[in-house]
Amino acid sequence: MASGKDVVGSVLIAGGGIVGMQAALDLADSGFYVHLVERAPGIGGIMAQLDKTFPTNECAM
């Protein structure tokens, strides 16, 4: 949690893909309680299934 800030509320994020995880981290750093909900057994979304990313051809894992 950000230093010197009180928790200002809570937020529900539907989807544990890359964007959902980044939003959860950003909101948690801002002082919100975050509930991340994902329907699949794992998080990461489509990105977790990829081998390489475009355009840098880096490993997606």
Image (cartoon, rainbow, N blue to C red):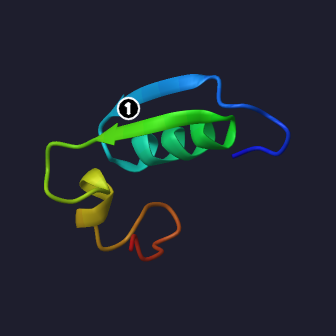
Is 20 situated above or below 52?
above
* Residue under label 1: 13
Mark 1, secondary structure of its residue: strand
> Most extreme residue toward the right, as rendered?
4
Is residue 31 rendered to the left or right of residue 13? right
Is 37 situated above or below 7?
below
| Residue lying at 49% horizontally and 26% vertically, measured from the top left | 10
Numbered circles on residues, count: 1
- Residue 45 appears at what percent x and percent y? 27, 52
- Residue 13 appears at what percent x and percent y? 38, 32
**Amino acid at circle 1:** Ile
> Most extreme residue toward the front, as rendered?
6
Is 53 situated above or below 36?
below
Is residue 51 rendered to the left or right of residue 23? left
| Residue lying at 44% horizontally and 42% vertically, measured from the top left | 19
| Residue lying at 52% horizontally and 38% vertically, measured from the top left | 23
Which image quadrant: the C terminus? bottom left
> Most extreme residue toward the left, as rendered?
40
Of the pair 23 and 37, the residue shown nearer to us: 37
Is residue 8 rendered to the left or right of residue 58? right
| Residue lying at 48% horizontally and 75% vertically, measured from the top left | 58
For disc 1, the neighbor class at 10 Å (few under 14, some 14 to 19, many from 20) is: some
- Residue 30 appears at what percent x and percent y? 69, 35
Q: Report which quarter residue 3 is drawn in.
A: top right
Is residue 55 rendered to the left or right of residue 38? right
